[in-house]
Amino acid sequence: MSDPSKQPEAPNPDTDAYAHESELEAHLQPKRMYINMGPSHPAMHGTVRMKVELEGETIIKADPEIGFLHRGFQKSCENVTWTQCLPYTDRLNYNSAMMNNFGFLNAVEKLIGLEIPERAQYIRVIASELHRMHDHLTCVGATALELGGFAPFLYAIEGRELIMDRVTELTGARLTTSYGRVGGLNRDLPEGWIPKTIKSLDKIQELLVEVEGLLMKNRIFVDRMKGTGLLSAEDALDFGFTGPCLRAAGVDYDVRKAKPYWVYSQLDFDVPVGTHGDNYDRYIMRLEEMKQSDRIIRQALAKLPSGPIIVDDWRIALPPKPEVYGTIEGVMSHFKLVMEGIPVPPGEVYDSTEAANGELGWYLVSDGGGRPYKVHVRAPGFPILSAIPQIIEGKMLADLIPTFDMINMIGGEVEQ
C-alpha cells in the first residue's frame, strides 16, 4: 500500500515539455533531400541539370551537370572551311551572336596577318556593342521575372526587340547572323539605319530608367540579390572569371582596355567595377555596361568613316558579282574560295575579345589549307558555371535562382 502521507510530485512543465520536444526531435530526425533542378526546370533555362542535396532549405551540395546542348562545335569547325565556321560560332552564345562571329574572325585575321578596313572595324564595334546590350537586357529581364518582377521583364524585352529589329535590318537575321567575313563584313549599313539606331538607343535608355525604378528600390528584389552569390576577388580569379562577374568582385579587367582591338582605343568609355562580388553587384555591372555600350555606339556612329567594308583581295574575299559573271579570273577565284576555302598560312594563334559574359578566346591552328586543323574556344561561361558549388553550398535554395541568373549561363558556349 502507498503511503497516504506522501503526495504525488507536481509536474514540472518546463522539464516535461523539454523531454517531449527532445523525444520528438529524436523521432523526426530531418532527412536530407536530393532534388534535380533541370534540365527542364524553368530556373535552369532548359540546358543544365543541377543535382542539389538539401537539409531543410539549406544547400549542402550542388553538382552542375552539363552536356544537354553539346553539338561537337570544335570538330564541326575542323571539317568545314574557315568561312563555313561562322554559323557554328553564332550558336555559341545566341544572345550575342555577332560577338562570337567577330571574335573568331579576329583570330583568323591575326593568323593571316591581315588588317581589315577602318569602316569595317567601326561597324564591328557598333554591332558588338548592340549585341552586348541585347545580352544584358535578356539577363536583367529574366532575373527580374524569376524573382517575381513581370513588368521590368517586359520593359527589358521591349528594349531587346528594338535591338533585334536593327540587327535584322543590318544582317538579314534576328538571332544567328553570320554577318562577319574574313577580311571584313558581309554587307554595309542599310540606308537610314543610323538614325533608326539612335532612335532605338534613346528609347532603350528610357526603358532602363523604368527597369531601375522598379527594381533598385524594391525590397524583395534587393533583399534577394544583396549578399547572395558572394565570391571574393581572389576566388573569382582562381576560377578563371572574366567579364561582369569578375568586375563585380572588384577586379578591373576588360579586354577592350587591357588589349584594345579594332577602334576601341579611339573611343571614350568607362569600365564599371563593383566591390562586393554578390548578385546585386553583378546586376549593377550589367546595367552600367549597357550605358557604356550606348556611349560607345553613339561615338562610333558619329566617327564612322567612309570606305570599303572588306579587303580587296580575291584570295580572301569573294569577288564582286559582275567580275564573277563576266571574267574568268572572277569565276575561278569564287570557285576556289567556296570549294577549297581561304588558304590561311600554317601556324597557331590565341586571340581574345571582350564578349558579353567575359573573355572569349580562340586558339586556332592552321596547316596551310582552307580548313582549320584545330579550333578551340575559351568560352567565358564555363569557368563561371564551375564555381557554382562553392558560391551556393551552405546557402538557401532560394538563393540559387538569382545566382544562376546572374552568372548568365549560356548552354551553347559552356558545352560547345
Image: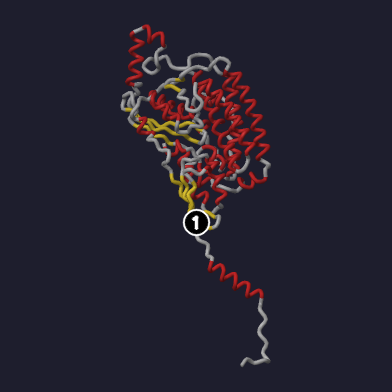
Task: Pinpoint residue 385: horizontal percent, then vertical percent.
Answer: 48, 43
Report crowding for label 1: few under 14, some 14 to 19, many 20 or more residues within 10 A (C-alpha).
Answer: few
* Along the line of sight, the residue nearer the viewer: 87 or 29: 29
Q: Is residue 5 above or below residue 168?
A: below
Task: Pinpoint residue 357: horizontal percent, then vertical percent.
Answer: 51, 36
State the count of labels.
1
- Residue 327 shown left or right of residue 271 in the figure: left
Task: Pinpoint residue 119: horizontal percent, then vertical percent.
Answer: 51, 18
Please report the residue visible at 42 percent of the width from the left and 27 percent of the height from the top: 87
Mark 1 residue type: Met
- Colour option used: secondary structure
Query: Looking at the image, can residue 146 be seen?
Result: yes
Q: Is residue 52 above or below residue 169?
A: below
Query: Looking at the image, can residue 238 be seen?
Result: no
Q: Which residue is mark 1?
A: 33
Q: Secondary structure at mark 1?
A: strand
Task: Pinpoint residue 204: horizontal percent, then vertical percent.
Answer: 62, 28
Q: Assign the C terminus to one quadrant of the image.
A: top left
Return the residue found at the far front: 1
* Along the line of sight, the residue nearer the viewer: 301 or 49: 49
* Along the line of sight, the residue nearer the viewer: 276 or 251: 276
- Residue 122 shown left or right of residue 342 in the figure: right
Please report the residue visible at 66 percent of the width from the left and 75 percent of the height from the top: 13
Q: Is residue 314 above or below residue 259?
A: above
* Along the line of sight, the residue nearer the viewer: 88 or 376: 88
Q: Assign the N terminus to one quadrant of the image.
A: bottom right
Return the residue found at the far top: 326
